[in-house]
Amino acid sequence: MSYDLLLARIKERLDATAMSERKACITADVGLNTIRHIRARGHAPKPANLQKLAVALGVSPSYFLDAAAGDEPMQRD
Protein backbone atom coordinates (compact mmCIF):
# COMPACT_ATOMS: atom_id res chain seq x y z
CA MET A 1 0.00 0.00 0.00
CA SER A 2 1.21 3.47 -0.85
CA TYR A 3 1.04 6.22 1.71
CA ASP A 4 1.65 9.12 -0.69
CA LEU A 5 -1.33 11.17 0.52
CA LEU A 6 -0.42 10.62 4.16
CA LEU A 7 3.22 11.53 3.54
CA ALA A 8 2.19 14.66 1.64
CA ARG A 9 0.03 15.73 4.56
CA ILE A 10 2.77 15.04 7.08
CA LYS A 11 5.26 17.02 4.98
CA GLU A 12 2.81 19.92 4.66
CA ARG A 13 2.42 20.04 8.44
CA LEU A 14 6.16 19.67 9.05
CA ASP A 15 6.75 22.64 6.74
CA ALA A 16 3.96 24.67 8.33
CA THR A 17 5.29 24.07 11.84
CA ALA A 18 8.98 24.31 10.82
CA MET A 19 9.54 20.96 12.54
CA SER A 20 11.92 18.24 11.44
CA GLU A 21 10.71 14.65 11.25
CA ARG A 22 12.80 13.88 14.33
CA LYS A 23 11.41 16.82 16.33
CA ALA A 24 7.85 15.85 15.37
CA CYS A 25 8.44 12.29 16.53
CA ILE A 26 9.94 13.46 19.82
CA THR A 27 7.07 15.90 20.39
CA ALA A 28 4.53 13.18 19.58
CA ASP A 29 6.31 10.66 21.82
CA VAL A 30 6.57 8.06 19.06
CA GLY A 31 9.61 6.19 17.76
CA LEU A 32 12.25 8.51 16.32
CA ASN A 33 12.06 6.81 12.92
CA THR A 34 8.27 6.55 12.66
CA ILE A 35 7.90 8.98 9.75
CA ARG A 36 11.03 7.72 8.02
CA HIS A 37 9.77 4.13 8.17
CA ILE A 38 6.50 5.13 6.53
CA ARG A 39 8.36 7.00 3.78
CA ALA A 40 11.35 4.75 3.15
CA ARG A 41 10.01 1.32 3.95
CA GLY A 42 6.29 1.68 3.31
CA HIS A 43 5.51 0.44 6.81
CA ALA A 44 1.90 0.71 7.86
CA PRO A 45 1.71 3.32 10.61
CA LYS A 46 -0.07 2.45 13.82
CA PRO A 47 -3.27 4.48 14.24
CA ALA A 48 -2.19 5.49 17.76
CA ASN A 49 1.07 6.90 16.38
CA LEU A 50 -0.76 8.82 13.66
CA GLN A 51 -3.04 10.30 16.30
CA LYS A 52 -0.05 11.44 18.35
CA LEU A 53 1.68 12.89 15.28
CA ALA A 54 -1.48 14.73 14.29
CA VAL A 55 -1.76 16.39 17.69
CA ALA A 56 1.94 17.29 17.65
CA LEU A 57 1.57 18.81 14.18
CA GLY A 58 -1.63 20.70 14.98
CA VAL A 59 -4.29 18.83 13.01
CA SER A 60 -7.14 16.52 13.90
CA PRO A 61 -6.21 12.85 13.97
CA SER A 62 -8.70 12.14 11.19
CA TYR A 63 -6.63 14.28 8.82
CA PHE A 64 -3.84 11.68 8.96
CA LEU A 65 -5.97 8.59 9.68
CA ASP A 66 -8.19 9.18 6.64
CA ALA A 67 -5.14 9.68 4.43
CA ALA A 68 -3.60 6.43 5.71
CA ALA A 69 -6.83 4.61 4.93
CA GLY A 70 -6.91 6.10 1.45
CA ASP A 71 -9.88 8.37 2.14
CA GLU A 72 -9.72 12.08 1.50
CA PRO A 73 -11.87 14.21 3.84
CA MET A 74 -13.27 17.45 2.51
CA GLN A 75 -10.99 19.69 4.59
CA ARG A 76 -8.51 19.60 7.40
CA ASP A 77 -9.50 20.88 10.85
Image: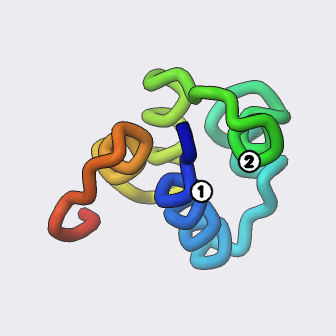
Judging by the rendered image, the residue that carries numbered circle 2 is 39
Residue type marked 2: Arg
In percent of width and height, residue 50 lies at: 50, 35
In percent of width and height, residue 45 lies at: 57, 28
**Cα distance between the residues tagged 2 and 1:** 7 Å
Quick one: quadrant of the N terminus?
Answer: top right
Other residues around mark 2 within 10 Å, as few (<14) / some (14–19) / many (≥20) = some
Q: Is residue 12 left or right of residue 77?
A: right
Residue located at (35% from left, 38% from top): 69
Q: Is residue 40 left or right of residue 2?
A: right
Residue type marked 1: Leu
Residue located at (82% from left, 44% from top): 40
Q: How is the image coloured?
A: rainbow
Q: Earlier in the sequence, mark 2 or mark 1?
A: 1
Judging by the rendered image, the residue that carries numbered circle 1 is 7
Give the quarter of the image for residue 29: top right
Residue located at (59% from left, 56% from top): 7
**Residue 62: numbered disc:** none
